[in-house]
Structures are given as structure tokens and as C-alpha cells.
Image (cartoon, rainbow, N blue to C red):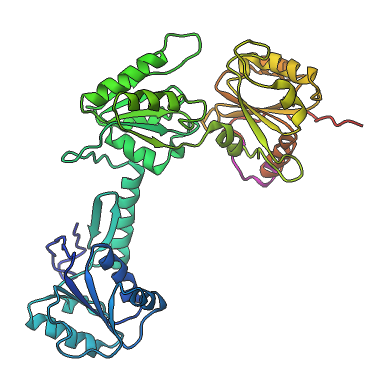
Amino acid sequence: MTAQAGDDEQEEAYLLGLRLHGRRVAVVGGGAVAARRVPRLLAVGADVRLISPAVTPALEELAAQRRIDWRPREYRPGDCANAWLVIACTDRPQVNAAVADEAEQARTWCVRADDAAASTAWTPAGGRVGDTSVAVLTGDPRRSAAIRDAITTALQAGTISARHHRSRAAGVALVGGGPGDPGLITVRGRRLLAEADVVIADRLGPRELLAELPPDVTVIDAGKVPYRRQMSQDEINSALIRHAQDGKFVVRLKGGDPFVFGRGGEEMLACLRAGVPVTVVPGISSATGVPTAVGLPVTHRGVAQAFHVISVHVPPGDERSTVDWPALARSGETLVLLMALERIGAVARALIEHGMRGNSPVSVIADGTMPTQRTIYSTLEDIETRLAEEGVRPPAVVVIGGVVTIAVELAGLGRALGVGDYDAPGAAPSPVPPLARDN
């Protein structure tokens, strides 16, 4: 990429990618410029000869490791012999000029760090993301670096749609999309999403990202909405395998983390048993991400040194439940409940029955990390009534334990200072009831 601010600032350059593996590069000078250039030259396999009486500690370490050929002396005529590229980066212009003259006589490209106009080659602001190299020249090194950073950041985030065409990704990627906010998907997850031919998306995944996909990408809605028609797990597994075996790269975009109540293990088993390769990209689980987003620490020194994450897709006492509710009631640690709203009454009664105090503090975060996020504070004995009054609907994360009192204090302090993001913009937080303590 080249850009010009004016006709007299920088003549246009013809950009090339130099394949320097096994080829000699002469670097004259051992200061900060050399310390920046040499690691990248080594990364592409260049045979680096460094000429300088003194070098930086990093370069000295490379020489000790025999990764570069350091000649600890002043430059001499002939040091550029047999070099494919020369970099003159001493702190003395007359030496750099002599190096450049020798390179010119040998018809060897030379970069002069102190005088771009006298150089036969320029070093662009370069970066690499995956298998993509980016090089920017503008005549202004700071501007070049800023443009380079903008491009590489966009490639990392997947906001530049740049699917491979010669070498395509294969198989299935199970991508954890995080708790809902599209900004909380990982860089790798977003990059793989930009590569997809087929996306099978959950309701709780960051669905806003689907609008950024090219029109030729097939999007399959596997949204698991309670009490409504949805794809069965067998149908999802079959779709993953079928599209992958047709040569498509399939992204399974899931909410939270694929392996935390996400059935990612089942989907990976099905794919691997069918001979389909699988990549797994972790995501921020709503079990920790949502409480964190509202300033609720699930552990806190002196309050809770452990937390338990429980899926309440079946209530206490159900024969399908494997949860030890009596042990949880006695633990004294933080309980994080997922899929619990419609069974919160049964959960509260079971915990109280097995010894947990009825005045134990509870926080319910609905639509966590989303613009409609809101937080409800209550106590274990009152939470069922409170949620009914507030009309709270899934998805929501329920947190029970002493850490809720820490969250209440943090929220109050944050609002008093006018900082933090403890409640949705424009939405008033629910009133915080006094959390009773035993006498």
C-alpha cells in the first residue's frame, strides 16, 4: 500500500515481498533501529550479518545464541559483499553514506535509516495477521504505523471481510461468542466467523455479527427459544457434518463458552466420529462474564473463596437432576445459576430447606452485557415474588451469596462517582433492599 501527501514529499514506490530465507542481509549498526529490524529478518529466515563495535543487549543475546553473525568492529569496505539487502543504521551519516555507496556499486538494495531520500529501498510499516502480511508506505513513518495498526486490528477482529479463496479453512469451528455483547467475542472467534461459508447460530450468541457476513454465507438459525420450535441437537449435529463434508467451512456460533453448558462436547464428538476436523474457540461464559459486567465479583477475599456454577434446566427433586442441593446450601460459597428463572422458587425453597438462610442476598442480571441489561437485588426468601413483580424474562444469571453485598456497595460507589456501567444506559437500577444480617 502506498500513499502520497504531495508530489514533492515522496516518489511512488513499487512494493515487493522479498523472500530472504537463507539469503545474506548485511546490517551495519547495532543500535535501536537494528534491534527492531533484525528480529523480523530472522523471522523470515534471513542470514543476518551484523557489523557494529557495540550492540544492544537483545542483539548481543541473538549473537550469543548464534542466530546472527556479529562482527564486533567498525564498517569496512567489502562488508556488503554477497548481500541481497543492506541496512545502514549507524548513528554516523558519513558511515551510512559509505555503506549505501558500496551497495549502489554492487546493485544491491539499501535502506538508510537516517536519510530516506538517499535510500534505494524503504522499509514499510509492516505487520502480520495469520498468513496475511501488511505493508504501508506514506512518507510519514508515524502515519504509516497508524494505518498499519488499523488494518491489522481490523483483520484480527474480523471486521475486514477477507475470506481465503486459494487455501480455505476446513471442517467445523465451535466458536464461543460470549455472553451477548458482540464486542466480547474473541479476536480469533471473529476472524474465523469472517471465513465461514456456513454459520449455525444460537439465539444467545452475538447475532449482530451475522449482519456483517457476506451475502453468500448460509446462516442457519438454531435458536433454542423456550417452548418454541427449535432444531434438535441431532439435527444440529447432522447439519454441521453435512455442510463440512460438502467442502464448506462451518462456524457453530454459540453463546458463552462452547464447553460450559453449550453441548460443545457432544457436537465435537459427532463431528470427529464422522471424520470432520474441529477447531474449538473458547468464549466468555455468562456464568462469570455477566456478573463481572455489572461489577459483581463471584469470589472475594474473606467472603467467598469458591463459586459453583449450576444449570437449573430441571428443578431440585427432579429425577433427572444430578445437583447436590443440600451440599450447595451448606457450602457458604457463591452459587451462580443458569437457566434458573422459571424454577427459582423451587431452588429457593430447596436451599432454605437444606439450611441456607432466607435472608441470603441474591442478584439477578437479565440480558447481561446487552443494552437492555438490568440488575435485580433481593433475598433468597423474596426473590420469586420480586422477579414476578419485575416481569423478568430469560436470559438471566442468578447469583446467590455474600458477594452480592459487595456488588451492592460497588454499584452505589460507582453511581456516586458517575462512573462504571452497572446498569443499562437510560435505565434506572432496581431499588436495593436492606440485606438482613443475623443478630
Residue that extends furthest to the right in the rendered view of this protein: 439
> Which residue is at the front of the view, 349 or 259?
259
Q: Residue at x 70, y 21 (%)?
A: 325
Residue 6 x/y as whole percent: 18, 65
75 lies above or below 56: below
Q: Which one is in front, 215 or 165?
A: 165
Looking at the rendered structure, the number of numbered marks drawn on it comes to: 0
Can you say which quadrant of the picture contains the C terminus? top right
Q: Which residues are magenta?
A: 415-422
144 horizontally vs 109: left or right: right
Along the viewing direction, whichever of 240 and 374 lies nearer the viewer: 240
Question: Which quadrant of the figure has residue 436?
Answer: top right
Q: Quadrant of residue 267?
A: top left
Residue 419: say if magenta: yes
- Helix, strand or loop for the magenta stretch, by majority: loop
Res 73 quadrant in image: bottom left
Q: Is residue 411 magenta?
A: no
Name the quarter where the N terminus is drawn. bottom left
Viewed as shown, does residue 278 lie left or right of 228? left
Q: Is residue 139 above or below residue 212?
A: below
